Amino acid sequence: MSETLIETKNLTINFGGLKAVDDVSISVKKGLFTTIIGPNGAGKTTLFNLISGLLQPTEGIVYFKGADITSLSPMQRVAMGIGRSFQLTNVFPNLTVHENVRLALQSREKTGYKIFTSYKKFPALQEEASALLEQVLLDDKMNSPASSLNHGEQRKLELAMVLAMKPDVLLLDEPTAGMALEEVPAMFELLEKTKKEQQNTILLIEHKMDLVTKLSDTVIVLVNGSVLTEGTAAEVSENPDVLKAYLGGGILNESTA
Amino acid sequence: MPMLTNILRKKPALGPGMWLFLGLFAVLILIIPHITGLTTTTLLSRIYILAIFGMSYDILRGYTGIINLGHALFFGGGTYIAGIMFSRMGATLDILLLAVLVSMVFAAIVAYIMGQFAFRGSGFTGVIACAMITLAFGEIGRHSAETLREYTQGADGLTFRVPLMFQDRVMMYYYALLFLIAMTLILRQFVNSPTGRVLQAIRDNDQRAKFLGYDTKKYKLIALVIAGMASAAAGIMFALLTRFANTELLTVQSTLNALLYTIVGGTGTLYGAIFGTAFVQLAQNYLLELRGIHEIFSRWLLFFGAIYVLVVLYMPKGLVGTYLQLEEKWRKRKIAA
């Protein structure tokens, strides 16, 4: 049995009367690819916000590498090795694409407090940023401001930024949303490669069921804020409850759209 | 993959015409005190010094996205510290060095404390809280200067002598020029450092910077301390030039002047502050000279209000910002052609 990286215990958050996440206890094992699926409004992103520290739970505990991190700031969690991407575009719009990635690398290398050295004195970071952008097929946009990218391209940039940080666990919130359809397989290939080469742990939120089947070691189905079921992709897709939830939510067949 | 970085933007080389122009301009700047009167020489010295005050404000607003309404506290603080020390301890070079040391420590400590209070919140409410708290700090400074009459002469203002080597207007011009060049180089190095780059990320998206693992509050503190020290240094130079300190230096109006320099010159461009200060100071002077033609020109603030509105509406990027934008456009057209 491999080591558990992230664990949540009875995680609950109330927004007024709405329980967006309701008593969720999941665990993410090291080196595995775990996918969270569920219809819109199931609480997937909210769960991510709780794990990454953007939101504080009403009840419950978040563990990372066995330590209680529930009251830590997002920044402290990043320092411990949790990296996340955002579903809604969240980059530095006025900086160039290259600079966005370079800043992520700079954070990882902890060179941020050098006050009077030129940032150009760290060519390794520049090279690595360029290489990452090539991986996510963005190398031709390197010098454009991030705000000039279309939605799909910004998703790629997000991915490059989170990969740059080489976190112990990557929380990826629908990384392929809005991407041109023919580019999606390339992105998943990249994820697969990342997982294999660096033995990364990935926790992914995804809408497109067919894409995750191949990659995921474990699939967690979230409906109305609670875990409906958990298992391998095959188990989950044959589960009648899941089919019902998805038919109700109506997204299982949407995967090809 | 090493060739990839070659694609990274390189500044186009300057043509021979541009070099000639810059060379002539440099010569003009160097000989100007010998070909014009003392009034112009002093006005230019004033511009050089105030430009650094403006530049320090640009570090905050243009590079970090902080609205500091109490920034005059550092500038006025520097002028007052120099003035009080000169008048109490004597106008010598040793005292000047001591005054520099004292005001740097003063600026660093005050900036640190100010930042601890001002950078607590985040998001929109954080911005408002920061503006209000810095405003309060600035007002405390102004009020202290008014009430500590024994040291500051209160509202009358403090007149003092300066070390001999700064009494000659022409020499003072060169010191001011040297100060401008040195501080511009230092601040440029700062904004191009890894730290400066993080500041720009924070300006763009504070939350994302946190999720990259940056302690944004600490970085904002660094920005405020550096900007505060630069501003205090400009304050000392201002003391050497004017030999006079009054509470007006510490008012919100004084901070807003710095804001005006950066807006006219171009926010987030650093050099913009130099052009902005020059434009504002020269315009102010010119308008005052027109007094003889019509009474209305003595109300130069009226015209400033109008200029302010026009710049914000039609040239939001300021002089330097607009120039850079045009240059980029020309370059793209050239590549396309």
Image: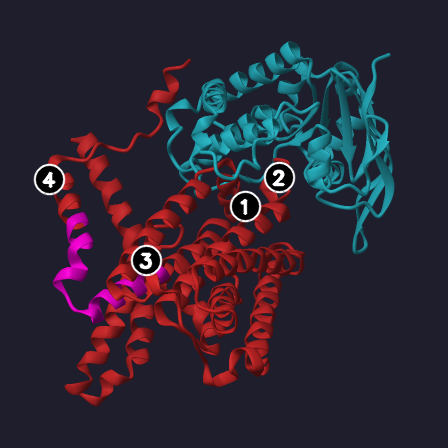
Chain colours: A cyan, B red
Give the amino acid type for the residue marked by disc 4 in the picture: Gly
The residue to which callout 4 is attached is B17
Identify the mark nearer the N-term, 3 or 2.
3
Q: Is residue B12 found left or right of B192 in the rendered image?
A: left
Cα gap from disc 4 to disc 3, whole angstroms: 28 Å
Element under disc 2: loop
Identify the mark nearer the N-term, 4 or 2.
4
Element under disc 1: helix
Give the amino acid type for the residue marked by disc 2 in the picture: Tyr
Q: Quadrant of residue B102?
A: bottom right
Instruction: Verify CB contact (< 8 Å) between mark 4 and mark 3.
Output: no
Q: Give the letter of the chain under mark 4.
A: B
The residue to which callout 1 is attached is B202
Tell me the number on the disc at residue B176: 3
A90 up-or-down from A237: above or below: below
Q: Is residue A179 found left or right of B2 in the rendered image?
A: right
The magenta span reads B26-49
Cα gap from disc 3 to disc 2, whole angstroms: 37 Å
